[in-house]
Image (tube, rainbow, N blue to C red):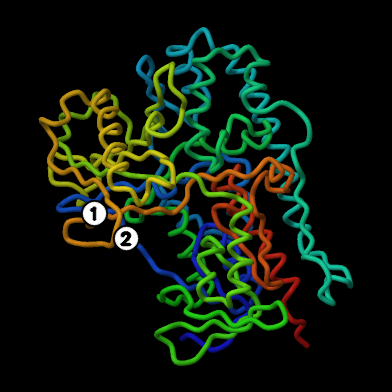
Amino acid sequence: MITRSYDAVIVGPSAGSLTAAALLAARGLQVLAVDRREGRPAAGRYTFPSHTRPVMGFEGGTLLPAVLRALQVHPREMRLLRRARPGYQVISPRHRIDVHADADALYAELERELPAELPALARFLSRAEEAGEAYAQRLLASAQAAGQLRWWHRVGLGRMPWSPPLPGGGPTFVEAARQEGMGDEGLRFLLAQVRPFSWVEGPGDLPLPMAAIPLMASFDGWFTDPDEPDAFQAMLRRRVEGLKVDLLSEPDPEEVIARWRRVRELRFSTRPEPVSTSALILGMAPESLAPALSERAGAAYRAASAVLRPTRFRYSLYLGLRKEVVPVGMGDHAIFCARDDEPVEGVNCLLISLSAEDQSGVAPEGCRAMTVSADLPLAEAADPGALDARAREMLTRVKELVPFLERYLEVLHIPRPGPVGQDNPLPVDATPAVFAGDPGAARLPTFGGMGVHLPHRNAFYAGRASMPALGIEGEVLSGMVVDRLVKAVLPRKR
């Protein structure tokens, strides 16, 4: 039953905000999550894989396993996530590499496909793993120490302290690869795995320890939940439900009432009385809350979002096709990367997922559902003409992989801007997937991210842009930090 008062309210559930919700609820605090659930993409008789958030680093990553231990996720919940075998494939015009979590199997693949690059790859991956693990431990220690207040913070002076360590000097991801003697083919193989799973422009320019975290997570493989579009978020939702977090299926707040630099109440259009709270946690972009705030506060939230500029969104095409057209040995998940003379980005770095052959109820017998995604400029999200051109480019690339596609194609859905309708059951989702900061932002603790602080002292952000360079692991790390900061700002109870 929804009450009138909470220690913390979550608006816009994300991996980070739900992590914070679970940790706060485990402390015995009263938490409300305003949650609008979404189903898997579907059109006609087909239900499609989703590229909203593939889970990587679930077992062998550097940060995610530590967060799962902190959340005390039950092993039964973890078994609902299904590991693809192979984890995924990296496909180029000249190579198709199965990426296995097993080191020996991966080594055999690289020896077969990239023998000239193998010594450099082995040296680089050993160096990256060591750097990533050391940096992850520093980040975890910093998150555990967050929220240590001094007297001036308690009287309202200064922000809640959190200073995550920067990687310091040293080479970038690309520079380190070149130092180890990596050639172009090996580097493109690695960039194809970092590009879709770190949410910043130019991931090759990240410091090696930072880029190593999403890279090591990607080598762990691709985990999905056959029944959920966002596997990790679905697992977190089940966790918070088990911890008695109240869930409210509502649109975003109609009004946010604040006094003395603190959020006090939230008003929803369908509820007669406001909900009071001691802390507000956003999983959505801060500017999304601006319409519910006063003009001055709304401008401050837009400014907070502007610290990290969203540049790209993930655009997906949905295909239903006869399974005989699927190339022999095609994995359930693949990264189809560019030709040698093209950058590893946009339509030259496609995510391709097929529904598993044993997954009943998602496609007619003898058929497979396929999702093809690319990160496109955000400015194109509302431009039907630009999206049509991009869709043609994406399909041209897919035909390079599946030459007889038209002959076996049963369903093709190309999302268009606008509301859901009969002719557009899956409209464009313009949620940002890639971010860029100005040159000065690179000196921020999150390497261009806006961190976890918002203009109100008891409002925090734990969404995709909080630590975008680290991908999903950065998002859940921000949830751990927010848990500590919320605990620090809550009123002391006698």
**Residue at (54%, 85%) from the top-left corner?**
275
Q: In the rendered image, which residue does mark 1 sit on?
A: 42
Q: Classify residue 394 by image quadrant.
A: top left
Q: In the rendered image, which residue does mark 2 sit on?
A: 39
**Residue 428 image position (x, y, % from top left):** 33, 52
Between the residue at mark 1 and the residue at mark 2, the CA separation in whole angstroms equals 8 Å
> Do residues under tags 1 and 2 come within 8 Å of each other at their CB atoms?
yes
Q: Is residue 457 left or right of residue 15?
A: right
Q: Amino acid at mark 2?
A: Gly
Q: Amino acid at mark 1?
A: Ala
Q: Is residue 163 left or right of residue 15?
A: right
**Residue at (50%, 72%) from the top-left corner?**
291
Point out the image quarter for the C terminus.
bottom right
Q: Secondary structure at mark 1?
A: strand
Q: Is residue 133 left or right of residue 366?
A: right
Q: Nearer the viewer, residue 391 or 138?
A: 391
**Residue 113 image position (x, y, % from top left):** 43, 13
**Residue at (68%, 40%) from the top-left corner?**
439
Q: Classify residue 333 by image quadrant.
A: top left
Q: Is residue 415 left or right of residue 7?
A: left
**Residue 348 image position (x, y, % from top left):** 39, 28
Q: Residues within 10 Å of mark 2 (few under 14, many from 20)?
A: few
Q: Which mark is residue 311?
A: none
